[in-house]
Image (spheres, rainbow, N blue to C red):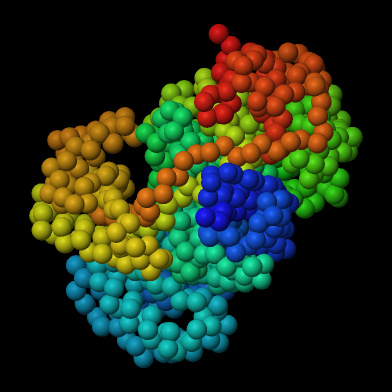
């Protein structure tokens, strides 16, 4: 049989990572500079390079899986479509009022994020549905036709539709969608809340569908452009996009539901860590993914990533913490619970007005890049500090793809930070490294400590281009005792794409106290959701016999404002009444430290998850290591714990095969650098992971 290939492509702020796995399970990878003017060029460059190295033709590629930051960047940069909202009369300000929360309680300068649909572009229509799904006032279609005229005059590119209580009865939204589609034509992107989030809570549902509409034209254009460029390169294989929940969906489905891919890239790395961690026996994991722009953390328990529907995007942040609200636009969709901090290799270093050193959140990106890249950047960054300390190869990185100018890094760090602060160059660089680690520690705490988990009971799984560089420093701050660095950590998220299953989730609100529920009602709801999920997956090309279903229930104590999700048996509705309550009390105790088993509980939502299982084993196989062009035996490296510079061995990963080696030690690879400081030791496990632990 001829060799075929599957490809994963992950776009980052600095590099685009491409991983190719052949049908004989051989893995090849490369890093190529990202192309911000047209990100698809970076993907084509990486794929072309790998196929060229293998002397393989494009028609041998049978699948391309993509992770993209196009959605999140569009919201963060405010570059989405000109968007309107059509809603029930009297409710057009729901997205502006929000939940009356502020991210910092005593910040007198706090400004709420400007709604993505401006007030003059929010239109009210006469209609009213009651909470039980009955019609109080029929929808006025003549008003809608007049609104369509206003929408055209305002030159809007997208329109969101969200009516009061439409989750209970979507008839009015469906009628409005059809009416506006006829009046506006295909040029204007339409999105209705019952297609995006058919759940209770007006603000979250309306905000989510507005975000979806705001992203729709941008994401649709991007995916169509990418498919066209791939086809021009002879790559006609199906294109899938990873969702924020870690599952994959077709590019067509992603164009219809762009809010589902906001955290596409970070989710892929967590999926890879869950697969490898489970295979290698690391059950409880906190991932630490540090790239060029941000550092991200997520929690994996019993082999499964923690997921959430509490998420905000925009106003310069991405947050899933329940403790911090009001800084962005709510998106109530399933996400792998990733905490993201603006601290990466390209994070710019500066002194604030008080003379304190600040690292990030603004980044030099790939253009102009850190000062040491010698491509025009004149602001010192985390990477420049690492070069000055000797932690990073001062000559080149990425196997020679990026040449470095160490003298330039020292010059700009001295001029911008060291001299004004009255510090030596090494003190300034070490301070940058320490401050960045302390900042990134907050991301780890957001997914562990803030959710009732003790990070000391977890393994820190470090990847990304800079994750292994700073992981031990972060682990020390959190008193964690084990750091694991997987093979080819710099392209690890791209590898995770190859382990993503096709996945769809649908939710239905069933808002009743447990005492009022009956098995027949639950069975009907689960059966309806299962059928809808199966239809969505089959539309993506999944055979019905390959679909496996899971179910969850969102439950809370009567009187609470928010709920917790617990698994339920999708085949046995009766088990929800007998077992879900017990599971909820246990989860409440674990999350909040207390439970009240004697108190009444209520069901809010049912959720069904469909996964494609094609019978193909997705075993983890380490990629082929790339040889480095520039090799040293040792380097003089500054470690604060040692009080100065120490001659430090530079080794390849394979050098750890004969047993543990004590730090200080630096493991240089094509796509990343792992630092083992004094007082720690490193060894390899059977899966070729670097395992770093404190010396006895």
Q: Quadrant of residue 641?
A: top right
List x then y, in percent, for residue 66.
Answer: 56, 57
Residue drawn at (68%, 51%), measured in percent from left and top?
54
405 relative position to 181: left or right: right
List x then y, in percent, for residue 365.
Answer: 72, 49
Q: Residue furthest top?
A: 696
List x then y, in percent, for residue 113.
Answer: 54, 58
Residue drawn at (42%, 52%), measured in percent from left and top?
501
Residue drawn at (25%, 55%), measured in percent from left and top?
606
Q: Residue furthest front?
A: 1
3 and 663: which one is in front?
3
Quarter of the image with the C terminus in it: top right
Q: Can residue 566 be seen at all in this image of the molecule?
A: yes
Residue drawn at (38%, 31%), measured in percent from left and top?
452
How many numbered discs sit on the rendered protein? 0
List x then y, in percent, for residue 160.
Answer: 44, 73
30 and 451: which one is in front?
30
200 relative position to 58: left or right: left
Q: Can residue 72 be seen at all in this image of the molecule?
A: no
Taking 37 as reference, is 340 above or below it?
A: above
495 and 37: which one is in front?
495
370 relative position to 497: left or right: right
């Amino acid at each position: 049989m001829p060799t075929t290939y599957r490809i994963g492509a992950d776009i980052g702020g600095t590099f685009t990572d491409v991983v190719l796995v052949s049908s004989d399970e051989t893995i090849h990878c490369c890093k190529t500079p990202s192309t911000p003017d047209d990100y698809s060029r970076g993907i084509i460059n990486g794929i072309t390079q790998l196929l060229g190295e293998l002397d393989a033709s494009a028609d041998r590629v049978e699948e391309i899986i993509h992770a993209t930051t196009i959605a999140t960047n569009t919201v963060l940069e405010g570059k989405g479509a000109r968007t309107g909202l059509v809603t029930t009369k009297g409710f057009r300000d729901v997205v502006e009022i929000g939940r009356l929360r502020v991210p910092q309680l005593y910040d007198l300068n706090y400004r709420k994020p400007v709604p993505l649909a401006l007030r003059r572009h929010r239109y009210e229509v006469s209609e009213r549905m009651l909470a039980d799904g009955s019609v109080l006032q029929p929808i006025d279609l003549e008003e809608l036709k007049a609104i369509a005229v206003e929408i055209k005059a305002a030159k809007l590119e997208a329109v969101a539709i969200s009516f009061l209580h439409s989750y209970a009865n979507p008839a009015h939204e469906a009628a409005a969608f059809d009416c506006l589609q006829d009046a506006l034509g295909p040029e204007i992107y339409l999105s209705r809340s019952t297609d995006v989030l058919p759940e209770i809570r007006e603000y979250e549902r309306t905000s989510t569908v507005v975000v979806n509409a705001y992203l729709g034209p941008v994401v649709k254009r991007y995916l169509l452009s990418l498919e066209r460029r791939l086809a021009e390169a002879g790559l006609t294989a199906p294109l899938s996009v990873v969702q924020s929940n870690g599952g994959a969906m077709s590019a067509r489905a992603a164009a219809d539901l762009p809010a589902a891919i906001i955290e596409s890239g970070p989710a892929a790395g967590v999926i890879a860590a869950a697969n490898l961690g489970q295979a290698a026996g690391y059950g409880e994991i906190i991932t630490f993914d540090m790239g060029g722009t941000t550092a991200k953390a997520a929690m994996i328990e019993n082999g499964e990533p923690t997921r959430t529907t509490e998420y905000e995007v925009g106003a310069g942040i991405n947050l899933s913490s329940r403790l911090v609200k009001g800084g962005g636009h709510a998106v109530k969709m399933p996400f792998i619970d990733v905490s993201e901090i603006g601290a990466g290799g390209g994070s710019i270093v500066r002194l604030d007005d008080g003379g304190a050193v600040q690292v990030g959140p603004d980044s030099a990106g790939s253009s102009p890049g850190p000062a040491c890249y010698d491509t025009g950047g004149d602001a010192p960054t985390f990477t420049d500090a690492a070069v000055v300390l000797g932690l990073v190869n001062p000559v080149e990185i990425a196997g020679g793809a990026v040449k470095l100018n160490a003298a330039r890094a020292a010059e700009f760090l001295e001029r911008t930070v060291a001299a004004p602060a009255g510090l030596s160059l090494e003190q300034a660089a070490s301070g940058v490294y320490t401050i960045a680690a302390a900042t990134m520690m907050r991301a780890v705490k957001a997914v562990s400590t803030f959710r009732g988990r003790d990070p000391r009971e977890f393994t820190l799984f470090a990847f990304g281009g800079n994750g292994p560089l700073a992981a031990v420093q972060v682990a020390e701050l959190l008193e964690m005792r084990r750091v694991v660095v997987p093979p080819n950590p710099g392209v690890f998220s791209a590898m995770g794409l190859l382990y993503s299953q096709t996945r769809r989730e649908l939710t239905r609100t069933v808002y009743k106290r447990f005492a009022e529920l009956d098995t027949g009602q639950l069975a009907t709801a689960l059966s309806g959701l299962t059928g809808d999920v199966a239809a969505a997956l089959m539309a993506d090309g999944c055979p019905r016999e390959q679909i496996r279903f899971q179910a969850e229930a969102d439950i809370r104590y009567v009187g609470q404002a928010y709920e917790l999700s617990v698994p339920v048996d999708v085949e046995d509705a009766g088990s929800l009444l007998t077992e879900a309550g017990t599971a909820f009390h246990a989860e409440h105790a674990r999350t909040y430290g207390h439970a009240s088993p004697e108190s009444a509980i209520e069901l809010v939502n049912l959720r069904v998850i469909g996964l494609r299982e094609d019978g193909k084993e997705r075993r983890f196989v380490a990629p082929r290591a790339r040889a480095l062009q520039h090799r040293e035996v040792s380097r003089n490296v500054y470690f604060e714990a040692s009080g100065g510079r120490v001659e430090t061995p530079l080794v390849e990963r394979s050098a750890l095969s004969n047993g543990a080696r004590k730090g200080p030690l630096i493991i240089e690879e094509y796509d990343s650098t792992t630092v083992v400081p004094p007082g720690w030791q490193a060894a390899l496990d059977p899966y070729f992971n670097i395992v770093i632990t404190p010396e006895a």
